[in-house]
Image: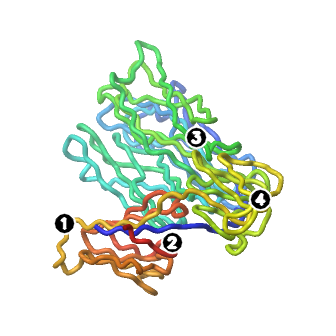
Protein backbone atom coordinates (compact mmCIF):
# COMPACT_ATOMS: atom_id res chain seq x y z
CA UNK A 1 0.00 0.00 0.00
CA UNK A 2 1.35 3.44 -0.93
CA UNK A 3 0.53 6.76 0.72
CA UNK A 4 0.92 10.30 -0.51
CA UNK A 5 0.46 13.08 2.04
CA UNK A 6 -0.12 16.61 0.79
CA UNK A 7 -0.81 19.99 2.33
CA UNK A 8 -3.03 22.80 1.05
CA UNK A 9 -2.53 26.35 2.31
CA UNK A 10 -4.99 28.81 0.82
CA UNK A 11 -7.51 29.76 -1.86
CA UNK A 12 -9.14 33.04 -2.92
CA UNK A 13 -12.93 33.34 -2.95
CA UNK A 14 -15.11 35.98 -4.63
CA UNK A 15 -18.57 36.95 -3.41
CA UNK A 16 -21.57 34.77 -4.25
CA UNK A 17 -24.47 35.54 -6.60
CA UNK A 18 -28.09 36.44 -5.87
CA UNK A 19 -30.93 33.92 -6.03
CA UNK A 20 -34.70 33.60 -5.57
CA UNK A 21 -36.56 30.94 -3.59
CA UNK A 22 -39.89 30.19 -1.96
CA UNK A 23 -41.22 27.42 0.28
CA UNK A 24 -44.63 26.30 1.53
CA UNK A 25 -46.90 23.40 2.56
CA UNK A 26 -49.95 22.11 0.70
CA UNK A 27 -52.58 19.52 1.49
CA UNK A 28 -53.57 17.76 -1.73
CA UNK A 29 -56.65 16.12 -0.21
CA UNK A 30 -58.12 15.50 3.25
CA UNK A 31 -59.44 12.27 4.75
CA UNK A 32 -63.23 11.76 4.85
CA UNK A 33 -63.80 14.63 2.42
CA UNK A 34 -65.53 12.56 -0.29
CA UNK A 35 -62.75 12.93 -2.87
CA UNK A 36 -62.21 10.49 -5.74
CA UNK A 37 -58.96 9.00 -4.39
CA UNK A 38 -60.80 7.84 -1.29
CA UNK A 39 -64.28 6.93 -2.53
CA UNK A 40 -63.52 5.33 -5.91
CA UNK A 41 -61.36 2.47 -7.15
CA UNK A 42 -60.97 3.01 -10.90
CA UNK A 43 -57.70 3.93 -12.63
CA UNK A 44 -56.47 6.43 -13.57
CA UNK A 45 -57.65 8.88 -10.92
CA UNK A 46 -55.90 11.90 -9.46
CA UNK A 47 -56.43 15.25 -7.73
CA UNK A 48 -54.70 18.45 -8.93
CA UNK A 49 -54.18 21.62 -6.92
CA UNK A 50 -52.65 24.85 -8.20
CA UNK A 51 -49.80 26.50 -6.25
CA UNK A 52 -49.26 30.24 -6.80
CA UNK A 53 -45.95 31.81 -5.80
CA UNK A 54 -46.11 34.90 -3.62
CA UNK A 55 -43.61 36.61 -5.92
CA UNK A 56 -43.08 35.97 -9.62
CA UNK A 57 -39.75 34.32 -10.44
CA UNK A 58 -37.43 35.62 -13.16
CA UNK A 59 -37.59 32.19 -14.80
CA UNK A 60 -39.44 28.94 -14.02
CA UNK A 61 -37.82 27.57 -10.85
CA UNK A 62 -36.91 24.00 -9.96
CA UNK A 63 -39.38 22.45 -7.49
CA UNK A 64 -38.49 19.94 -4.78
CA UNK A 65 -41.27 18.02 -2.97
CA UNK A 66 -41.02 16.47 0.48
CA UNK A 67 -43.80 14.08 1.50
CA UNK A 68 -45.15 15.36 4.83
CA UNK A 69 -48.31 13.32 5.45
CA UNK A 70 -49.79 10.19 3.92
CA UNK A 71 -52.72 8.04 4.94
CA UNK A 72 -53.81 5.05 2.84
CA UNK A 73 -55.53 1.71 3.27
CA UNK A 74 -53.63 -1.55 3.53
CA UNK A 75 -53.97 -3.79 0.46
CA UNK A 76 -51.71 -6.25 -1.31
CA UNK A 77 -50.79 -3.45 -3.71
CA UNK A 78 -50.66 0.03 -2.22
CA UNK A 79 -48.84 3.27 -2.91
CA UNK A 80 -49.23 6.69 -4.48
CA UNK A 81 -47.53 9.25 -6.73
CA UNK A 82 -46.97 12.96 -6.11
CA UNK A 83 -46.09 15.20 -9.00
CA UNK A 84 -45.10 18.82 -9.69
CA UNK A 85 -45.88 19.84 -13.28
CA UNK A 86 -46.68 22.86 -15.46
CA UNK A 87 -44.03 24.87 -13.60
CA UNK A 88 -44.04 28.54 -14.61
CA UNK A 89 -42.69 31.78 -13.16
CA UNK A 90 -46.03 32.24 -11.36
CA UNK A 91 -46.64 28.76 -9.91
CA UNK A 92 -47.06 25.05 -10.61
CA UNK A 93 -49.54 22.17 -10.55
CA UNK A 94 -49.30 19.71 -7.64
CA UNK A 95 -50.95 16.30 -8.13
CA UNK A 96 -51.82 13.30 -5.98
CA UNK A 97 -52.20 10.16 -8.10
CA UNK A 98 -53.54 6.69 -7.27
CA UNK A 99 -51.58 3.63 -8.39
CA UNK A 100 -54.13 0.94 -7.50
CA UNK A 101 -57.71 0.46 -6.35
CA UNK A 102 -56.55 0.99 -2.76
CA UNK A 103 -58.05 4.01 -0.97
CA UNK A 104 -55.87 7.11 -0.60
CA UNK A 105 -57.22 9.16 2.30
CA UNK A 106 -54.79 12.06 2.70
CA UNK A 107 -51.61 13.48 1.17
CA UNK A 108 -49.69 16.61 2.17
CA UNK A 109 -46.32 17.94 1.01
CA UNK A 110 -43.75 20.59 1.84
CA UNK A 111 -42.57 22.21 -1.39
CA UNK A 112 -39.49 24.28 -2.20
CA UNK A 113 -38.97 26.35 -5.36
CA UNK A 114 -35.41 27.36 -6.30
CA UNK A 115 -33.99 29.79 -8.84
CA UNK A 116 -30.38 29.15 -7.90
CA UNK A 117 -27.56 27.81 -10.05
CA UNK A 118 -25.95 26.26 -6.95
CA UNK A 119 -28.78 23.74 -6.45
CA UNK A 120 -30.43 21.24 -8.76
CA UNK A 121 -33.62 19.17 -8.44
CA UNK A 122 -33.71 15.77 -10.14
CA UNK A 123 -36.88 13.70 -10.43
CA UNK A 124 -36.26 10.00 -11.01
CA UNK A 125 -38.85 7.27 -11.49
CA UNK A 126 -38.66 3.67 -12.64
CA UNK A 127 -40.60 0.42 -12.56
CA UNK A 128 -37.62 -1.71 -13.64
CA UNK A 129 -36.80 -3.38 -10.32
CA UNK A 130 -36.79 -7.11 -11.06
CA UNK A 131 -34.35 -7.83 -8.19
CA UNK A 132 -36.66 -6.09 -5.70
CA UNK A 133 -39.94 -7.48 -7.05
CA UNK A 134 -39.09 -11.11 -6.30
CA UNK A 135 -37.76 -13.08 -3.36
CA UNK A 136 -37.72 -12.18 0.32
CA UNK A 137 -35.41 -10.77 2.96
CA UNK A 138 -33.38 -7.62 2.48
CA UNK A 139 -32.58 -6.86 -1.16
CA UNK A 140 -30.63 -3.84 -2.38
CA UNK A 141 -29.64 -2.36 -5.74
CA UNK A 142 -27.64 0.69 -6.82
CA UNK A 143 -28.71 3.30 -9.38
CA UNK A 144 -26.28 5.65 -11.14
CA UNK A 145 -27.99 8.94 -12.00
CA UNK A 146 -26.33 11.66 -14.07
CA UNK A 147 -26.56 15.31 -13.06
CA UNK A 148 -25.23 18.64 -14.36
CA UNK A 149 -24.58 20.56 -11.15
CA UNK A 150 -20.96 21.63 -11.09
CA UNK A 151 -19.25 21.26 -7.69
CA UNK A 152 -22.15 19.19 -6.33
CA UNK A 153 -21.33 17.93 -2.86
CA UNK A 154 -24.52 17.31 -0.87
CA UNK A 155 -27.73 15.48 -1.74
CA UNK A 156 -31.03 14.74 -0.02
CA UNK A 157 -33.74 12.35 -1.23
CA UNK A 158 -37.51 12.52 -0.81
CA UNK A 159 -39.82 9.59 -1.56
CA UNK A 160 -42.73 10.98 -3.63
CA UNK A 161 -44.12 7.79 -5.15
CA UNK A 162 -44.03 4.04 -4.76
CA UNK A 163 -45.87 0.79 -5.20
CA UNK A 164 -44.99 -1.02 -1.96
CA UNK A 165 -42.28 0.27 0.39
CA UNK A 166 -38.56 0.88 0.22
CA UNK A 167 -35.82 3.21 1.40
CA UNK A 168 -33.32 5.39 -0.44
CA UNK A 169 -29.92 6.91 0.19
CA UNK A 170 -27.50 9.11 -1.73
CA UNK A 171 -24.37 6.97 -1.47
CA UNK A 172 -21.88 9.12 -3.41
CA UNK A 173 -21.89 12.36 -5.40
CA UNK A 174 -19.27 13.60 -7.82
CA UNK A 175 -19.16 16.33 -10.46
CA UNK A 176 -21.22 14.34 -12.98
CA UNK A 177 -23.02 11.47 -11.26
CA UNK A 178 -24.54 10.28 -8.03
CA UNK A 179 -25.09 6.75 -6.77
CA UNK A 180 -28.42 5.99 -5.09
CA UNK A 181 -29.25 2.79 -3.26
CA UNK A 182 -32.76 1.31 -3.20
CA UNK A 183 -33.71 -1.38 -0.69
CA UNK A 184 -36.75 -3.41 0.20
CA UNK A 185 -37.18 -5.69 3.20
CA UNK A 186 -38.74 -8.92 4.50
CA UNK A 187 -41.43 -10.07 2.07
CA UNK A 188 -41.91 -6.61 0.52
CA UNK A 189 -41.97 -6.40 -3.28
CA UNK A 190 -41.08 -3.11 -4.93
CA UNK A 191 -42.67 -2.49 -8.33
CA UNK A 192 -42.29 1.27 -8.81
CA UNK A 193 -40.35 4.15 -7.25
CA UNK A 194 -40.39 7.91 -7.78
CA UNK A 195 -38.02 10.20 -5.93
CA UNK A 196 -36.96 13.84 -5.79
CA UNK A 197 -33.26 14.48 -5.28
CA UNK A 198 -32.05 17.91 -4.22
CA UNK A 199 -28.35 18.52 -4.97
CA UNK A 200 -26.29 21.45 -3.77
CA UNK A 201 -22.76 22.77 -3.48
CA UNK A 202 -21.03 23.33 -0.15
CA UNK A 203 -22.17 26.98 -0.32
CA UNK A 204 -25.86 26.30 -1.02
CA UNK A 205 -26.82 23.11 0.84
CA UNK A 206 -25.88 21.06 3.87
CA UNK A 207 -27.38 17.62 4.52
CA UNK A 208 -27.28 15.28 7.47
CA UNK A 209 -26.29 11.66 7.29
CA UNK A 210 -29.20 9.53 6.08
CA UNK A 211 -30.65 8.04 9.25
CA UNK A 212 -32.49 4.85 10.17
CA UNK A 213 -34.61 4.87 13.34
CA UNK A 214 -35.57 1.34 14.42
CA UNK A 215 -38.42 1.19 16.96
CA UNK A 216 -38.10 -1.58 19.54
CA UNK A 217 -40.76 -2.09 20.66
CA UNK A 218 -42.68 -0.90 17.64
CA UNK A 219 -44.13 2.62 17.32
CA UNK A 220 -47.95 2.58 17.64
CA UNK A 221 -50.80 4.29 19.49
CA UNK A 222 -53.53 3.01 21.78
CA UNK A 223 -57.01 2.26 20.40
CA UNK A 224 -58.58 5.13 18.48
CA UNK A 225 -55.81 7.55 19.38
CA UNK A 226 -52.62 8.91 17.83
CA UNK A 227 -49.11 9.10 19.26
CA UNK A 228 -45.92 11.00 18.42
CA UNK A 229 -42.15 10.69 18.78
CA UNK A 230 -39.74 13.60 19.12
CA UNK A 231 -37.08 13.42 16.40
CA UNK A 232 -33.95 15.59 16.32
CA UNK A 233 -30.93 16.21 14.11
CA UNK A 234 -27.78 17.90 15.38
CA UNK A 235 -26.75 20.79 13.13
CA UNK A 236 -23.09 21.95 12.88
CA UNK A 237 -22.49 25.36 14.42
CA UNK A 238 -21.40 26.91 11.12
CA UNK A 239 -24.81 26.07 9.62
CA UNK A 240 -26.83 27.60 12.48
CA UNK A 241 -27.46 30.97 10.85
CA UNK A 242 -30.48 33.20 10.51
CA UNK A 243 -32.19 32.95 7.13
CA UNK A 244 -31.40 29.33 6.32
CA UNK A 245 -34.25 27.03 5.22
CA UNK A 246 -34.67 23.65 6.98
CA UNK A 247 -35.84 20.60 5.01
CA UNK A 248 -36.95 17.22 6.36
CA UNK A 249 -37.50 14.22 4.11
CA UNK A 250 -38.99 10.80 4.81
CA UNK A 251 -37.27 8.44 2.37
CA UNK A 252 -38.57 5.06 3.50
CA UNK A 253 -40.57 3.17 6.13
CA UNK A 254 -41.18 -0.27 7.54
CA UNK A 255 -44.79 -0.95 8.56
CA UNK A 256 -46.58 -4.03 9.83
CA UNK A 257 -47.80 -5.58 6.59
CA UNK A 258 -51.38 -6.05 7.85
CA UNK A 259 -51.89 -2.49 9.14
CA UNK A 260 -52.72 0.75 7.35
CA UNK A 261 -49.67 2.86 6.32
CA UNK A 262 -50.34 6.20 8.05
CA UNK A 263 -47.65 8.62 9.20
CA UNK A 264 -46.75 12.30 9.11
CA UNK A 265 -44.40 14.88 10.62
CA UNK A 266 -45.22 18.30 12.09
CA UNK A 267 -43.96 20.96 14.54
CA UNK A 268 -40.70 21.46 12.64
CA UNK A 269 -38.34 23.81 14.53
CA UNK A 270 -34.76 24.84 13.80
CA UNK A 271 -32.30 26.59 16.11
CA UNK A 272 -29.20 24.78 17.35
CA UNK A 273 -30.89 21.50 16.33
CA UNK A 274 -33.55 20.61 13.79
CA UNK A 275 -36.52 19.00 15.56
CA UNK A 276 -39.87 17.57 14.49
CA UNK A 277 -42.64 15.31 15.75
CA UNK A 278 -43.30 12.01 14.00
CA UNK A 279 -46.97 11.05 14.33
CA UNK A 280 -48.97 7.86 13.67
CA UNK A 281 -52.40 6.37 14.49
CA UNK A 282 -53.77 3.45 16.49
CA UNK A 283 -54.25 1.23 13.41
CA UNK A 284 -50.66 1.64 12.17
CA UNK A 285 -47.61 -0.26 13.46
CA UNK A 286 -44.28 1.36 12.53
CA UNK A 287 -41.11 -0.71 12.83
CA UNK A 288 -38.66 1.76 11.26
CA UNK A 289 -38.47 5.21 9.67
CA UNK A 290 -35.69 6.38 7.36
CA UNK A 291 -35.26 10.15 7.32
CA UNK A 292 -32.78 12.89 6.51
CA UNK A 293 -32.57 16.65 6.94
CA UNK A 294 -31.05 19.40 4.86
CA UNK A 295 -30.35 23.09 5.31
CA UNK A 296 -30.69 25.32 2.25
CA UNK A 297 -28.45 28.40 2.31
CA UNK A 298 -30.21 31.27 0.48
CA UNK A 299 -28.93 34.62 -0.78
CA UNK A 300 -26.88 36.73 1.65
CA UNK A 301 -26.34 33.70 3.88
CA UNK A 302 -23.03 31.92 3.65
CA UNK A 303 -21.88 28.52 4.90
CA UNK A 304 -18.74 29.04 6.92
CA UNK A 305 -15.76 26.79 6.35
CA UNK A 306 -15.89 23.64 8.50
CA UNK A 307 -12.18 22.78 8.26
CA UNK A 308 -10.41 26.06 7.53
CA UNK A 309 -10.32 29.71 8.60
CA UNK A 310 -12.00 32.22 6.29
CA UNK A 311 -11.12 35.92 6.45
CA UNK A 312 -13.66 38.52 5.23
CA UNK A 313 -13.26 42.15 4.18
CA UNK A 314 -16.69 43.13 5.60
CA UNK A 315 -18.68 42.46 8.77
CA UNK A 316 -21.04 39.47 9.09
CA UNK A 317 -18.88 37.27 6.86
CA UNK A 318 -19.46 39.38 3.75
CA UNK A 319 -17.28 40.93 1.07
CA UNK A 320 -14.20 39.34 -0.45
CA UNK A 321 -12.79 36.40 1.45
CA UNK A 322 -9.61 34.39 1.81
CA UNK A 323 -9.38 30.79 3.07
CA UNK A 324 -6.48 29.65 5.24
CA UNK A 325 -6.09 25.91 5.79
CA UNK A 326 -2.50 25.84 7.09
CA UNK A 327 0.06 28.61 7.60
CA UNK A 328 0.97 31.49 5.31
CA UNK A 329 4.16 33.51 5.89
CA UNK A 330 3.14 36.39 3.59
CA UNK A 331 -0.57 37.04 3.00
CA UNK A 332 0.10 39.95 0.61
CA UNK A 333 2.25 37.76 -1.61
CA UNK A 334 -0.60 35.23 -1.85
CA UNK A 335 -3.14 37.86 -2.94
CA UNK A 336 -4.78 39.06 0.30
CA UNK A 337 -4.16 42.74 1.03
CA UNK A 338 -7.47 43.89 2.55
CA UNK A 339 -8.26 44.84 6.15
CA UNK A 340 -10.03 42.06 8.05
CA UNK A 341 -13.52 42.88 9.41
CA UNK A 342 -14.77 39.36 10.27
CA UNK A 343 -13.61 35.77 10.11
CA UNK A 344 -14.76 32.23 10.87
CA UNK A 345 -12.86 29.55 12.81
CA UNK A 346 -13.89 25.88 13.02
CA UNK A 347 -14.69 24.59 16.50
CA UNK A 348 -11.78 23.60 18.75
CA UNK A 349 -9.20 25.28 16.50
CA UNK A 350 -6.82 28.21 17.05
CA UNK A 351 -5.88 31.00 14.65
CA UNK A 352 -2.82 33.19 15.13
CA UNK A 353 -2.59 36.45 13.16
CA UNK A 354 0.67 38.44 12.97
CA UNK A 355 1.09 42.09 11.97
CA UNK A 356 4.38 41.32 10.18
CA UNK A 357 5.53 38.74 7.65
CA UNK A 358 7.05 35.37 8.58
CA UNK A 359 5.09 35.07 11.82
CA UNK A 360 6.80 38.02 13.50
CA UNK A 361 5.58 41.17 15.21
CA UNK A 362 2.45 41.33 17.35
CA UNK A 363 0.74 37.91 17.62
CA UNK A 364 -2.99 37.72 18.36
CA UNK A 365 -4.79 34.48 19.27
CA UNK A 366 -8.42 33.70 18.29
CA UNK A 367 -10.51 30.63 19.17
CA UNK A 368 -14.00 31.55 17.90
CA UNK A 369 -15.81 33.34 15.07
CA UNK A 370 -15.64 37.13 14.92
CA UNK A 371 -18.69 38.58 13.13
CA UNK A 372 -17.64 42.26 13.24
CA UNK A 373 -14.39 43.71 14.54
CA UNK A 374 -12.39 46.88 14.10
CA UNK A 375 -10.34 46.60 10.92
CA UNK A 376 -7.11 44.73 11.46
CA UNK A 377 -4.24 44.21 9.04
CA UNK A 378 -2.50 40.84 9.18
CA UNK A 379 0.58 40.03 7.11
CA UNK A 380 1.01 36.38 8.12
CA UNK A 381 -1.14 33.67 9.73
CA UNK A 382 -0.92 30.22 11.33
CA UNK A 383 -3.71 27.68 11.55
CA UNK A 384 -3.73 23.97 12.38
CA UNK A 385 -4.86 22.22 9.16
CA UNK A 386 -6.96 19.17 8.52
CA UNK A 387 -4.63 16.38 7.42
CA UNK A 388 -4.77 16.04 3.66
CA UNK A 389 -3.74 12.94 1.76
CA UNK A 390 -3.88 10.72 -1.26
CA UNK A 391 -4.10 7.03 -0.37
CA UNK A 392 -3.77 4.17 -2.83
CA UNK A 393 -5.04 0.75 -1.77
CA UNK A 394 -4.11 -2.32 -3.84
CA UNK A 395 -6.64 -5.13 -3.36
CA UNK A 396 -5.82 -8.73 -4.34
CA UNK A 397 -3.30 -7.61 -6.96
CA UNK A 398 0.05 -9.19 -7.81
CA UNK A 399 3.16 -7.38 -8.90
CA UNK A 400 3.10 -9.49 -12.05
CA UNK A 401 -0.41 -8.29 -13.04
CA UNK A 402 -0.63 -6.49 -16.36
CA UNK A 403 -2.37 -3.54 -14.74
CA UNK A 404 -1.40 -2.49 -11.21
CA UNK A 405 -0.86 1.26 -11.52
CA UNK A 406 -2.52 4.60 -10.87
CA UNK A 407 -1.86 7.53 -13.22
CA UNK A 408 -2.53 11.13 -12.14
CA UNK A 409 -2.94 13.78 -14.89
CA UNK A 410 -2.95 17.57 -14.92
CA UNK A 411 -5.77 17.79 -17.50
CA UNK A 412 -9.12 16.09 -18.07
CA UNK A 413 -9.35 12.98 -20.26
CA UNK A 414 -5.93 11.68 -19.13
CA UNK A 415 -3.94 14.46 -20.82
CA UNK A 416 -1.22 16.89 -19.78
CA UNK A 417 1.47 16.20 -17.22
CA UNK A 418 1.33 12.86 -15.47
CA UNK A 419 2.82 10.84 -12.66
CA UNK A 420 2.58 7.07 -12.21
CA UNK A 421 2.26 5.15 -8.94
CA UNK A 422 2.91 1.42 -9.37
CA UNK A 423 2.54 -1.35 -6.83
CA UNK A 424 5.87 -2.65 -5.58
CA UNK A 425 7.81 0.57 -6.27
CA UNK A 426 8.84 3.01 -3.56
CA UNK A 427 8.14 6.71 -3.95
CA UNK A 428 11.35 8.72 -4.04
CA UNK A 429 11.55 11.49 -1.41
CA UNK A 430 12.33 14.10 -4.04
CA UNK A 431 9.31 13.16 -6.17
CA UNK A 432 6.56 15.77 -6.40
CA UNK A 433 3.24 16.31 -8.15
CA UNK A 434 3.69 19.87 -9.46
CA UNK A 435 0.13 20.20 -10.78
CA UNK A 436 -3.53 20.05 -9.78
CA UNK A 437 -4.96 16.60 -10.41
CA UNK A 438 -7.81 16.70 -12.96
CA UNK A 439 -8.08 13.05 -14.07
CA UNK A 440 -7.02 9.65 -12.76
CA UNK A 441 -6.54 6.30 -14.51
CA UNK A 442 -7.14 3.45 -12.07
CA UNK A 443 -6.56 -0.24 -12.77
CA UNK A 444 -9.04 -2.85 -11.49
CA UNK A 445 -8.86 -3.83 -7.80
CA UNK A 446 -7.32 -0.51 -6.81
CA UNK A 447 -8.95 2.15 -4.60
CA UNK A 448 -7.85 5.80 -4.58
CA UNK A 449 -8.82 8.02 -1.65
CA UNK A 450 -8.39 11.80 -1.75
CA UNK A 451 -8.84 14.19 1.16
CA UNK A 452 -8.07 17.89 1.46
CA UNK A 453 -9.23 20.72 3.66
CA UNK A 454 -10.45 22.76 0.70
CA UNK A 455 -11.42 19.78 -1.50
CA UNK A 456 -15.09 18.80 -1.00
CA UNK A 457 -15.01 20.45 2.41
CA UNK A 458 -12.49 17.99 3.85
CA UNK A 459 -14.60 14.91 3.12
CA UNK A 460 -12.80 11.80 1.87
CA UNK A 461 -13.52 11.08 -1.80
CA UNK A 462 -13.24 7.40 -2.78
CA UNK A 463 -12.73 6.24 -6.37
CA UNK A 464 -12.68 2.63 -7.57
CA UNK A 465 -12.73 3.41 -11.29
CA UNK A 466 -10.99 5.88 -13.58
CA UNK A 467 -12.10 9.52 -13.37
CA UNK A 468 -11.95 11.35 -16.70
CA UNK A 469 -12.53 14.83 -15.30
CA UNK A 470 -12.40 15.85 -11.64
CA UNK A 471 -12.93 19.15 -9.96
CA UNK A 472 -9.25 19.97 -9.48
CA UNK A 473 -7.63 18.33 -6.48
CA UNK A 474 -5.78 21.46 -5.45
CA UNK A 475 -2.56 20.21 -3.93
CA UNK A 476 0.67 21.60 -5.39
CA UNK A 477 2.80 18.72 -4.10
CA UNK A 478 2.91 15.66 -1.89
CA UNK A 479 5.33 14.76 0.88
CA UNK A 480 6.22 11.12 1.36
CA UNK A 481 5.70 9.88 4.93
CA UNK A 482 8.87 8.86 6.76
Q: What is the distance, in whole Å, between disc 1 and disc 3 at their CAs?
A: 48 Å
Residue at left 43%, top 59%?
460
Q: Which residue is mark 2?
A: 475
Residue 396 badge: 1
Mark 3 in CB contact with mark 2 (< 8 angstroms): no
State whether residue 277 is above or below residue 181.
above
Q: Which mark is residue 448?
A: none
Q: Earlier in the sequence, mark 2 or mark 4?
A: 4
Mark closest to the chain's N terminus, 3 or 2? 3
Query: In the rendered image, which residue does mark 3 sit on?
Result: 110
Based on the displayed image, in which of its 4 quarters is residue 11 positioned? Answer: bottom right
**Is the residue under label 1 in contact with that under label 4 (CB below 8 Å)?**
no
Mark 3–mark 2 Cα distance, whole angstroms, equals: 42 Å
Whole-Å distance between the Cαs marked 3 and 4?
40 Å
Residue at image point 45% right, 86% down:
417
Pinpoint residue 358: horizontal percent, then vertical percent.
67, 68
Q: Residue at x 61, y 67 (%)?
A: 10
In space, the residues marked 2 and 4 are separated at their CA atoms by 26 Å
Amino acid sequence: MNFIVVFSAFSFVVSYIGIQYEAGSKQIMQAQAGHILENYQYLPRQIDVHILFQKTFDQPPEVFLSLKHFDLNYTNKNGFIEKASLITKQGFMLSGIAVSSSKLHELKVDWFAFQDDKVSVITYESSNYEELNTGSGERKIYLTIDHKLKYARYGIISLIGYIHLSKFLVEQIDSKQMIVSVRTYNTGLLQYVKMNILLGTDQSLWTSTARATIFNPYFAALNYQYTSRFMTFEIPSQIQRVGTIPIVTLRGYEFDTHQHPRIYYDSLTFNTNLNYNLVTWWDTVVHAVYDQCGIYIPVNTKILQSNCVELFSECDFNGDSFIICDQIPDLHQQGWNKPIKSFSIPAFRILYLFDKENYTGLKTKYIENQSCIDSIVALSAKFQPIISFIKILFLNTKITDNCSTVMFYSECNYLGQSIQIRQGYQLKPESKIPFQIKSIQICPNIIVKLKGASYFGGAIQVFTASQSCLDSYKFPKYIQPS
